[in-house]
Amino acid sequence: MRPVSTTVRYVRLTWQLSAVSVHRLTEYRMDFLLGAGGLLLRVVCQVAVIGMVFRQVPEIAGWHYDQVLFLLGFSLLPRGLDRMFTDQLWILARKLVQNGEFFRYLIRPVHPLFSLLSERFLYPDGFGELLTGAGLVWYAAGRLTLTADTTRLLVAPVLVLCGTLILASIKTLFASLAFWTTNSFPALYAANQLGDFSGYPLDLYHPSLRWLLTWLLPYAFTAYVPASYLLFGRARPLPWLFAVTAGLVALALAVWHRGVDRYEMTGS
Amino acid sequence: MTAATLRRYAPFAVGSLQSLLRYRSMFLINALTATTAVGVQVALWRAVYAGGGLPGGYDLPRLTTYVLLAQVLALFQSNRVDEEVAGEVQRGDIAVSLLRPVSYPLARFAAGLPVSLTNATLVAVPVVVLYALSLPLSAPSPEGVLLFGCSAVLSLVIGFGVNLLVGLAGFVTTNIWGVRVVKDSVVAFFAGQVVPLALMPGPLAAVARALPFQGMVDGPLRLLLGRYHGPLGAAAILGVQLAWAAALSGLAALAWRGAVRRVEVLGG
């Protein structure tokens, strides 16, 4: 009975805290438009570059224009979701351990990680990525006349969720390093930056980079693997996707707990 | 500029150089961003050449050189001025700066210069060496290098003007992060940092040519790679840059005067 009631409690808390964020959002409308609009413009520029590439050749590394757009759009879905719910990890990496403010999250009657993340639930800038991603996927899928069979329609949201969990885990992992190094911002930034590779077909890259993006920092499973399944029906790596998601979540939580255990408050 | 003015503004440059030691991780971050960006772009274009394209008359070594040096120029123009100015506005420190008997924009320029130079040496050189060792590049002519040098100096002024204007947006909005995402993508795109202007479709290229940003990347690199017609063509590129540098400086000065009028600082 307890796991159920705990889950219900957290879901309810998430809902309420998200509602608080929406209120904040209406208060700072200009800021929201800038943040979400900025990310939208970034995607528009990416699409423009892809468009210019395909003005030269009909396909790159076996992918056509619409397929690359689909991949880019899909990559934005977990990215946007992750940004909406875990943005506070950036603050942890940058300063919460350094200035000792982290203790605030330890004295609340919820899991410290939840407590930390809840500070910025529904971070509005993520909407920009989520909406453009959905728009791109919709547009590209329409032009590709994808066969929307029930299996794919059911699996697609699960794949997005797994991608989100992978991104959130990578972020938690590198942000948690701050418990040892007091500031892990450069490490987190570096890990995050490599994610930029994942919006394009991995077939473009050198095998060593591809290996790194699949097994070391598994960004491949957030976009390339799910999109290849949805587009070409390549289902063979899917079991790996679930295994990697589960393993990475477990690892991130373990590192997080080790870090929290060794956290010491500042004296003041 | 007289010796007295130089003496007056030199402390800002020295102070900024000293504080750079605190931002050592910034160099690592910049290096990684540039390396990733070049990696993605080069992978895309290599696939285009593999598919038999010859975009805009650029051969692969030339286009690789372009993509790589575009990032170097971007590093050269990243002077933290936007962050510093917006930060001062947000914290209210701007009040102190107003008390100083110097021109604020000039003081900012002096403080930004060491950041640009350090970025261009400590960050850009390793990135260039890394790619020069792993990819075929095209060697520029001596006069190309000379023209590029002059042009790069002008691009520095244009970049400073743009950054100062972005920083002053801090008077209008609190989401400077959003403004900077907008700036980063739009400026980079129209500067030709991602794709040379010659590869853009007609109308887009026309827009890019009419904007000041092309003088930040595309102009200098056209001079370096010899993509102009005779001495007059080279002079035209430099002339347009010069005009934009002057116009942006004027605009920044005007914006600064307007901003000071609406400044409001709490307490003190």
Image: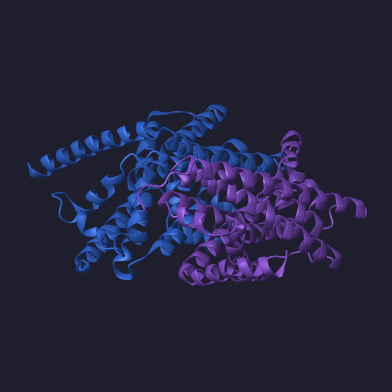
Tell whether A84 sits left or right of B146: left
Locate the N terminus of chain B by quadrant. Answer: bottom right
| Residue at position x 38%, y 29% in the image | A150
| Residue at position x 21%, y 68% in the image | A264
Of the chain colours in the picture, the one used for chain B is purple
Of the chain colours in the picture, the one used for chain A is blue
Of residues A183 and B158, the one drawn nearer to the viewer in this rendering? B158
Say if residue A247 shows up in the picture. Answer: yes
Instruction: Report the number of discs.
Output: 0
| Residue at position x 51%, y 40% in the image | A38
Q: Is residue B257 above or below residue A184?
A: above
Residue A265 x, y percent position in the rendering: 20, 66
Of residues B206 and A165, the one drawn nearer to the viewer in this rendering? B206
Residue A205 figure quarter:
bottom right
Q: Is residue A29 above or below residue B59?
A: above
Residue B87 x, y percent position in the rendering: 46, 53
Residue B7 x, y percent position in the rendering: 64, 70
Q: Is residue B100 above or below residue B48?
A: below
